[in-house]
Structure formats: C-alpha cells, structure tokens
Image (spheres, coloured by chain):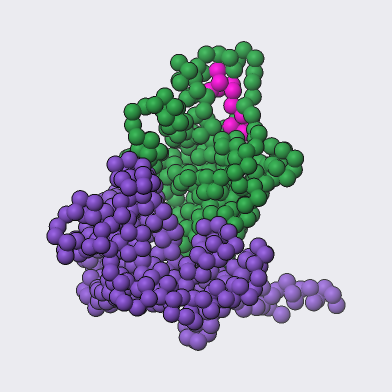
Chain colours: A purple, B green
Amino acid sequence: MSVISLEFIRRRRLAVEVRQQIWLPYRLSIIIGSVLFGLGISVAILLGRGIEISSIYEEFIIFTFFNAAGISAVIVESIPLVLVGLGAAMAFRVNFWNIGIEGQMFLGAIGASIIALFNIGPEFLRLPLMLVFSVLFGMLWALGPALLKVRLKVNEVISTLLLNYIAYYFVLNQLFGPWKDPRDKFPHGEQYENAERLPEIGWEQVHYGVVIVILMVVVVWWVVDRSRFGISSRFVGINPRMALAVGLPVSAITASSALISGGLAGSAGFVIASATEFRLTFTMAAGYGFSGIVIAFLAGSRPIPTLVVAFLMGSLYVAGESMKIFYSLPDALVGLIQAIIVISVIASEFFTRYRLRLAYFGGA
Amino acid sequence: MDLLTNWLAFTPVFAMPLVAAALGLIINERAGILNLGTEGIMLCGALVGVVGYIEFGDSVALGFISGILAGLVLGFIFGFLVVVMRTNQVVTGITFVILGSGLTGLMGIPWVNKAIAGISPIHIPFLTDIPIIGRFIFGQDLVVYVTIILTISTWYFLYRTRMGLELRAVGENPQAADADGINVEAYRLFAATIGGAFIGLAGAYLALAMAKIFVLDMTQGRGWIAIALVIFARWMPWRVILGGVLFGSIEALIPRLKAIGFPIPQYYLEMTPYLATLAVLIYAAIRVRSGQEAPKALGTPYVRQDRQ
C-alpha cells in the first residue's frame, strides 16, 4: 500500500508553465504585494535595529504626506530623482545599461559651475546657460561609453561605472585644489550668486526645478511615445537583430539614447548644484545612480510612471534622511531599502510570467 | 632600491583579491552567469571575514572561512534569483552591489574601523632575504600561494574534467547541453555558488590581509575591476594572474608614489586603476581573436519552456 502511494507522489512534479496571458488585477496585485513585502522586510530590519514602529509610521506617513512642509520636501527631493529616472529609462529602452549616472551628474554640475565660477554670460542668461552646459557635459560623459559600445562592443556597464570613479576623483581634485571655496577653505565649491540659483516658485521650498522636470517629462514622453525615434528605439530595445535586419540605424539610435540619458543625468547635477547645494560638492551625486535605475525599472522605463515612482522614492529619501539623523543610521539605509524592494519585485515577476502547477507524469 | 623591493613585495597583496574574484567570475561566466554584484558580495565577504576573525578570537582561518561562507551564501541567493526565479541578471547584479553596501553599512557598525592584526607574510630564512625578488616570491602570506593553487585547480576543473566540460557547455549552448541530458539549472546554480565563495574569499582578503581593517565601502570598485579583468583574461584562468599582477602593480605603486611625493596630484594617482581598467577593456575589445570570445550564452537565462 505504501509503495503505491510513494509512486503516486514520485510522479507528481512541480511544473513551470509559461503564462499566455495574465489577468490585469492579478498582475497588479502581484506587483503591489511584492513592493509591500519588500517594505515589510525593510521595516523588520529597522525594528531589529531597535526603532519603534510608531516612529517609523510617523516619519514615513505623517511627516512626509500629511503636511505642506513634508510634501514640499518630497517634491524638492523628487526633482533630481525624476531627472535621473528619465535618464536611466532612456538608456534602458535600448538595452544600454547606464550605470554612470553619478559621473554624468558630476559632469553636469561641473559644467554649471564653470558658468557660475567664471561668470560667463549676462546675469539673466546665467541659469539657462548653466542648464545647457550641464546637459552638454553630461552627454560628453556618456559619449565615450556609447561609442565604445556601438563601435567596439565594450560592455557599457563597466565603462560607465569606471567613469563614475574618474569623475569623482576629478571633482575631488578640483575641490581640494583650484576650485576650493576661497571664503572658508572647505573642500566644496564657491557658493553660487543669486543669479545662479534656481528661484523658488513661492510655495514652501519648491523651486523652479519643478518646471524643468515637467518640461523634461513632456519632452521625453513625446520622444518616447509620439516620435519616430521613440518607435524605432522601442524596436531596437525589444529585438536589435530584427531592427538591424529591417534597416534601422541601430547604432545611431543606441548611441543617441545613451547621450540623451547622459544629458538628463547632467541636468540632475545642475538642479542639485543650483537649487539645493548652491555649489559643487563631492557628495552631491551619492546614491542617485542606483535610484535612477530603480525608478526606471519600477516605472517600466515609461515617462509618466517615472514621475509617480520618483515622487514615492522622494518620500523614501525624505523619511530616510530624518531617520538617519534621529537614529544615527548609516547613509546606506535608503539604498538598502531600495535594494530589498527591487529584489522583491524582480523575484515576483516570476509569478506574472509563469504559472506553477502540480503535474502528473507517466501513465497509471 | 627600497621602492622597487617594496613595490614588488606588495604587488601580490593587491593582485590577490582581483585574481580570486576574477576566478570566481570565470566559473560563473563559463556557465553563462554574469554576476555584476561582485562588488557587493566582496564587501559582505570583507565584513563577515572581520566579524569571524574578531568573534572567534583573532582567528585568521575562521575569519577567511566566514568570509568565504558569506560569499557562498550570497552567490547562492544570486544564483537562485537569476536561475530559478529567472530575474534579469544585470538588474539583479547592480542591486546586489547596493544590497552589499547597505547590509554592511547597517549591520557592520560594531566592527567598522577596528584595526586587526590579520594575516602576516611568511618568512623563509635566506630565500625571503634575497634582494629585490625575495619578498616578492617567498615573502607573501599563505593565502597568496593558495590563490595560485586555486588558479591551477580552476583551470584543471574547467578544461580537464568532465564536469568542467559540461559547465562550459551550459555557458556556450544551454539548449544543446539540455538536449544532451545535462542539468543546466543545477550547473548554473553550482557555478553561481562556487563563484560567490571565491568572491567572498577576495573580500575577506581585502579586510584581513590588505587593509587589516573593515572600512565602509572599502572595495572601492575592485569588484568591477575584477569583472573587467575577466574580459581582459578572455575567460581563461591563467591569464587572470597576468592581469592581476598588472593591476596589482598599479595599485601597489600608488601609495609608494604618494610617499615619495611624486609630482602628480594625489587624486589623479587615485584615478589610475580605473583609467587602466578602461584602457585594458578597450585593448581587449580591439584585439578579439577567434576562440577567445565571451561564452555565447553569457547573461542570457535559459528557460526550457521558452525554447523555440
């Protein structure tokens, strides 16, 4: 008798089947469930560090969403996050893994600082010039990896990442050397003058970076969803060999997407330098590279969802910032929570793509 | 003279973590797995190595074993995600870098910045005292010599055993391997786990032998340099030693040049390993020869159900 039942179990296996289609509410609930699962693990880690649940609730919900100062702080925090998210998304759409966002941000801030330090151009043109320069400098930093990828097939993940370190040490060299603040001799750049700072729009601390962000989202949305370039780049992203076969300029599309990505990252550097730090600093880009990747990934590399995800990420930044100060938690906290959520979400995709089923093998 | 002796003597110390991590990555990539999370796994190996060392009463051996086990576990988790859960290897890898940085940052607080005695180099009378090359060849710590043995065994495993052949088949053409009855998923999971152990060893070495301290984010891009080193080495174990010594000598030279006040600004000196890595990547891309390409299925998941 027992032999028969054993045989019965042996012939049952867990089979993985590819889903042909998935019911949308089911798919959404898997994604939302996985984000909540990731947040749950993060909360568990915080509780393990001796932080009370009530203060986590207060920091993350009450102080960030239910008062004007909190919301304005989240908006200010999400401005550069939207820009790096869009930047990462532009590159990911053509399978160009731009890990060099932080380096491109540094270059953007350097470009803006050159205009500011040497007082180039009349005052009313100063800010537009800084923005243009930051975009160009960010593009410049993406140009090398883009060319290396399309010409020599050099892995862009490594080349863009190495350029982060090179940009970082260049900034250190400038800030400990020629660009050191002449006033307090600290290793940060000289403060920007008023004409070089993004003005506030008049509600709480929100500044005109919001306008830049809205413009960028609209432009990227148009490029991605409405232009010929967007359609071609989607083709390149999904099937580069087929795209090449039907005569699309795959290299040019890949390289220009990478350049746009670098330019957007550069503009994020400008926004932080001219609206938050008011100068070039060597800590300004920390963490934004991975945040951009996470935002683009969770938003499926689409511009409008990028805006939403970046806003949520901004609240994580604001709450994480005050948690770090009150509980002297390390800088890595926000990154850790992001990483846990991403792992949870990528693992959950298994359940949207496949179905697990108990299958019965063999005859009777 | 002293400069040269010291430079040579410290080159293997800087080369070892790169070599060990690159060997782990070769095992990974030969099976078709691209582990971009190396930087994060190394960092965890470094912290857990120090934790093991301190908590087991200043035991070098247990420190290294702890670091290796940390790498093994993380390598297994990485493998589970990309092989069983079929997640995107690039996204998973990058996430592991941040995960490693975050975990060590949050959990490592009690052990950060604590100087330790760590492992010391061996001393063989007469041999170690040979001028210039004595310390280079006969004055390293044991783990350096173990790493050379590991390089040879990795080569032997990959090219002289049936398992190694099957593992490489999985990385080149998983469909054919599967049709031949090779368990693709098992080999990939095995490769990710063993590769992770090598990366953990590299991390533990950073903390226990090179720096003799754990500092936050102390890997400083070495995980990424190791990934580039694999490309430079054309996925062949013995060439990793060559590349490792090249990078090790650059890294070993920097503090010595600083000490004698070499007239290049400090931060430009710090840039050189990354510039050299970039140069090596470009060099490797220009000089591609047939038979030396990346494993064909590198980075692509194998899903039998998706087969056409």
Q: Is residue A204 above or below residue B258?
A: below
Q: In terms of image quadrants, where is residue B299?
A: bottom left
State left or right for residue B83 relative to residue A156. right
Residue visible at 47% across and 72% down? Answer: A315
Main SS, magenta residues: helix
Membership of B58 in magenta stretch: no
- The quarter of the displayed image where residue A126 is located: bottom left
| Image quadrant in which the N terminus of chain B is located | top left
- Taking the image as drawn, is residue A158 in sight? yes
Write the residue at 53% across / 78% down: A61
- Residue A145 visible to the viewer: no
Report the front residue among A143 and A104: A104
Relative placement, left or right, of A286 versus B263 is: right
Task: Out of B116 and B235, give the one closest to the viewer.
Answer: B116
Q: Please state, as top left, top right, bottom left or bottom right, where the C terminus of chain B lies in the image.
A: bottom left
Residue at image location 53% in from the left, 79% down from the top: A62
| Left/right of residue A132 with respect to residue A16 in the rendered view | left
- Residue B20 vs A295, above or below: the answer is above
Q: Which span is picked out in magenta?
A: B134-144
What residue is drawn where x is 47% and y is 83%? A21
Q: Position of residue B128 (x, y in %)?
A: 59, 17
On the rendered structure, is B173 left or right of A13? Answer: left
* Percent position of residue A250, x then y: 25, 62
- Residue B278 in picture, x, y percent from top left: 35, 43
Q: Is residue B142 magenta?
A: yes
